[in-house]
Image (cartoon, rainbow, N blue to C red):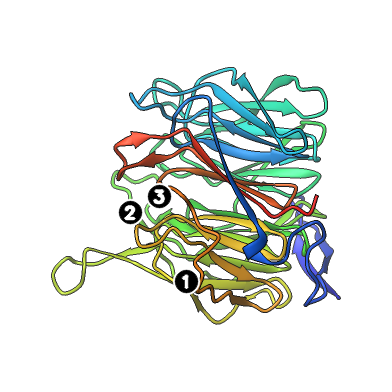
Amino acid sequence: MQYILLSRNIAGLLVLTVLLFAVPGLAAPGVIDDIYDWVFSGAMLSEPRSSVAATSVGNIALFAGGRLQNGSYSDVVDIYNRKSKTWTVSRLSVARSEIGAGSVGNRYALFAGGFDSSFKPMTLVDVFDAQTGQWSQIQLNTPRAAPRLLDLGSVVAVVGGLSGDLQYLSKAVDYVDANLTVHSTSLPSEYPQLGLPIFDSTSGIGLYTAGYQNSRPGERFNDFEPSNQTTIFAAASASLVAGPLFPYPRWGSGGAAANGMFVVGGGHMFGDGSSEPLTTVTDRADVFHAQTQQWGQALTLSVPRDYPLVQTVGDYVVFLAGTQATKALDIFDSRTGTFIVNPRHTPALYTLRDDAAAVTVDGCLLMVAGGTVYQGRNATASVEIFDACKS
C-alpha cells in the first residue's frame, strides 16, 4: 500500500513523500517469527559502565563512552560483529557521557555531543567508518549533551539535547548526510523539548515526541513539564513539520516503531504526595499510525515500566527493563496491532538493570549492555543477547 504525506522541507517548500507499508500477516525477512525460538546468550563489555551510547551499522554493534563506577567518564568503544561473533575494543577521541548515537548511509556510526569532564556540552562527533574500521571527527553547529539521533537512511538528524544555557533544552537540529556534511535547522515546536526519537523504515518517517519540555525558556527559573509536542521528519525530503499532540504526556517513556506503527509506552507522572502518590509509574502505551498521521487508542503493557529500553526486532516492538516486577519482555506485534499475550514469560532478561543501552543489529539481533544493578549501586559490564536471526 502507498500513502502520501504532504510536508515542508527545510527550505520551506512543500514536498510529497510516499509512505510504504508492509503487507499485514507476513513475517519480516530474516527474523524468526516465533518469539519462543529466539536464542539467548550473554557476553561482557570490556569495562563496567552505565549511560553507554549504542548504535548499529551494517552487521556490527557499537557501545561507546558512559560513566564508570567511580563517576568518571569512559572513552572505550566495545564493538561486536554479528557475522564473526567477535568483540574488539576501540576508543573515542574524548572520554564523555550523555552521548547521542546513530548511523547514516549504512556505513557510518556517529557518537554526537555529550558532556566533557568539566560538564560542558560538546559539538564533537566521533565517526566510525564500518567499511574501513577508521575513526574521524566532525562538529555539530550547536553544542549539546544527550542529543537524540534519528536515523533517516541517507541522512541522520541530531535533534535537541541539553544546551547548557538558560534555555537548558535545545531546539537545534543538525542534519548529517552520507558525505558527513552538516547543515542545520530547528524544531518547529513552541517549546524546547528533550523527546523520543523514533524512526520507521517502512513508512520512511521519524517522530520526535513525548519526553519533557521547558515551558519558560530563557527565564531565570525553568518550568519543566511532560511534553505533548510531536515533530514529524520525512526521510525522503529531509523535511520536518509539527505533528498531532502526544495524547498522554508523562516523564520517562520509551518507544520504537515497526510497519508504520510508532509505540510509546511506560513512564511516570508526579502527584502532590498527599491526595495522590508523589510518583506513579504507568503501563500505558500509545500508538501513532503513519497511515492516518494520528495517535490511536491506548494499549496496556503487562506491567508499569519507567524509562524502558525499547527496540524494533522485525515486525515486533520490544519493551525491556524499566521495572522491578518482571524480567520478561513486553512484545508488540505490528501485524495485529496488539501486545502478545505471553504466559510463559519468555524471552526475558537474566539481570534487572537501569541506565543500560540497547541496540538491534541487522533488524534481528537484540543486545542489552551495561547499566547499573542492585538498585543503582554497581555498574555492570553484562551484555544480554536475544538472537532472532534466521541466519
Q: Nearer the viewer, residue 28 or 146?
A: 28
Quarter containing the N terminus:
bottom right
Give the image location of residue 330, x and y in percent: 52, 66
Which is nearer the N-term, disc 1 or disc 3?
1
- Amino acid tagged 1: Leu
* Residue 28 visible from this viewpoint: yes
Q: Quadrant of residue 361?
A: top right
Residue located farthest toward the left when viewing the structure as drawn? 274
- Above or below, 219 against 302 in this view is above
Please indicate, yes or no, whether residue 175 appears anywhere in the rendered image: no
Which residue corresponds to mark 2? Answer: 223
Which residue lies at the image location 81% right of the left edge and 44% below the top edge?
A: 154
What distance separates the C-alpha of mark 2 from that of mark 1? Answer: 30 Å
Distance of mark 2 from mark 3, alpha carbons? 33 Å
The residue wearing badge 1 is 301
Camera-nearest label, 1 or 3? 3
- Residue 293 rendering spot, x and y as whole percentages: 68, 74
Q: Secondary structure at mark 3?
A: loop
Asked whether the residues under the numbered discs 2 and 3 touch, taking CB atoms below 8 Å apart as contact, a structural biologist would say no
- Residue 352 numbered mark, or none: 3
